[in-house]
Image (cartoon, rainbow, N blue to C red):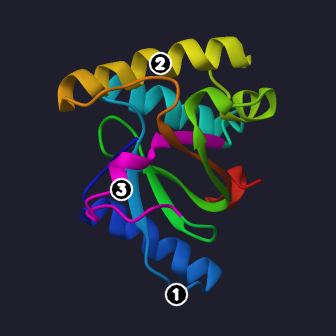
Amino acid sequence: MAAADKTPQTEAFWQAFVRQSGVAADYQIVAFGDGPALATELADLVVAGTKRATASLARDYADGVLPLPAVGDLVVVVDGAGAPRCIWRTTEITIQPLAAVDDRFAWDEGEGDRSRAWWLAAHRRYFARQAAREGFAFDDTIATVFERFTVVWPAEIAD
């Protein structure tokens, strides 16, 4: 998952949410994955109601550029073209080793066959690509942020 920049399109999407909900808060923007195709694929899973969790590495927040996710955060999800697709509210955060993922979290993340085995294999590949790009050591003990969320906007796809 990568942070994305606010754009006039995402700001208009956010302002529509604020007008409807009355929520006055700050928000973050994220695109899933490490490329446009994956960002769109995973945003589609959120919109479909299949994906209600995500994982990232704790090290991604160490420099303070991105705030560590927290319960209550509001996040605008964009697809691979940068178009806003939905807004989620973070409902749960746990930080533990990658290999500590459980069956329920793998299911909630909604990818592949939704099994723990599939989840681990896919995330090992994904985080290994990140490690190769960024030059850090990677193994199953790496601190991982496990985040659950509920969709709050648009209303027709909200949980």
Q: Is residue 60 magenta?
A: yes
Viewer-proximal residue among 6 and 19: 6
Q: Which residue is mark 1?
A: 24
Quadrant of residue 100 within the rendered picture? top right
Residue 8 drawn above or below residue 127: below
C-alpha distance separating marks 2 and 1 = 38 Å
Image: 149 above or below 13: above
Q: Position of residue 152 (x, y in %)?
A: 66, 62
Q: Residue at x 39, y 65 (%)?
A: 67
Circle 2 residues within 10 Å: few <14, some 14–19, many ≥20: some
* Foreground residue among 40 and 150: 150
Residue that badge 2 annotates: 124
**Residue at the location (64% across, 79% down)?**
21
C-alpha separation, residue under disc 3 versus residue under disc 2 = 19 Å
Q: Which mark is residue 61?
A: 3
Report the amino acid beneath label 1.
Answer: Ala
Determine if residue 7 is in view.
yes
Q: What is the span of residues highlighted in magenta in the rendered image?
A: 53-69
Amino acid at the residue labelled 2: Arg
Nearer the observer: mark 2 or 1; the answer is: 2
Q: Is residue 109 left or right of residue 31?
A: right
> What residue occupies the far right of the structure in this picture?
104
Q: Are discs 3 and 2 less than 8 Å apart at CB?
A: no
Q: Could you say where residue 54 lies in the image, as x and y percent from the top left?
A: 57, 40
Looking at the picture, tell me which residue is in the foreground, 100 or 15.
Answer: 100
Q: What SS does tag 2 mark?
A: helix
| Dot 3 amino acid type | Tyr
